Image (spheres, helix red, strand yellow):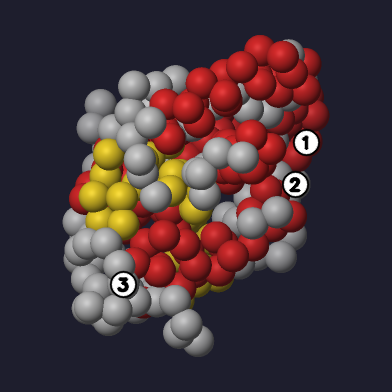
Amino acid sequence: MQRQYPAPPSQVYLFGTCVIDLFMPQAGLDAVRLLEREGLTVHFPQGQSCCGQPAYSSGNPVEARAVAAAQLDLFAEPWPVIVPSGSCAGMMRHHWPTLFEDDPVAGPKARALSERIFELGEFLLRVMKVQLQDTSPGQQAPESVVLHTSCSARREMGTRQHGVELVDALPGVTRLEHERESECCGFGGAFALKHADISGAMVKDKIASACATGADRLVSADCGCLLNIGHAAQHQGAPLPVEHLASFLWRRTGGAGEK
């Protein structure tokens, strides 16, 4: 069923995700800058933590429920909740209601909150109808990129299409497709720890396929995948820098260097 999108709001929440908080804070800051540039006031509840996906995908719904329950009341105002990670957005939108489906108190809260969950690219395109323009034309060199969309983000939130549309709208940017774009990078949270050899082979194939295009970098809206691909590429000595979609959009539209 096609999602019905609201009118552009004036205020939003940001759910920063634990990976952005701990490993890639610049992506979170750039997401805030993109939203503020659209005239939005961005609120960041300090009590937020993990979405519970690691526990949930590892077969621990009790732990996942405890993590989610601690955050259900943090987003009390009826504002959209913007998530700069398709997999975390998918967890909150599609699986939080399932976690609390038998809870008469938390269940309605989780279902109501899930309707306000938006992945960053989806929100910029479908709600804000953003028009991306380079504010410093002629100062940036042309750039070619390949996209990567995490498995759950692709299938649960449809975020590949949002990334495609945003990147294709950027002046001076060429998006290249590669043979293994739709495949998993091998991260999969706990999967990379439990099946390290398989995970390593998967990310090696992903990197080789992306490098074969001659792209300047790989762009993704999922930090877990970026950490996996980026570190593996460095370890292999592969010429494949990685960048979060929020940072890439901000930089390519003249945001780099702004305060």
On the rendered structure, is 139 left or right of 11?
A: left
**Rendering coords of residue 24 (x, y %):** 64, 56
Residue at the limit of the structure toward the front, as seen here? 237
Residue at the limit of the structure toward the bottom, as seen here? 259
Whether residues under marks 3 and 1 lie with C-beta atoms below 8 angstroms apart, the answer is no
**Rendering coords of residue 233 (x, y %):** 59, 38
Residue that label 2 marks: 70
Q: Residue at x 48, y 27 (%)?
A: 208
Q: Quadrant of residue 154?
A: top left
Whether residues under marks 2 and 3 lie with C-beta atoms below 8 angstroms apart, the answer is no
Badge 1 amino acid: Ala
Whole-Å distance between the Cαs marked 1 and 2? Answer: 6 Å
Residue that label 3 marks: 140
Q: Residue at x 51, y 49 (%)?
A: 242
Q: Nearer the viewer, residue 54 or 188?
A: 188
Mark 2 closeness class: few <14, some 14–19, many ≥20 residues within 10 Å: few
Image quarter (top left, top right, bottom left or bottom right) of the N terminus: top left
Q: Taking the image as drawn, is residue 246 in sight?
A: yes
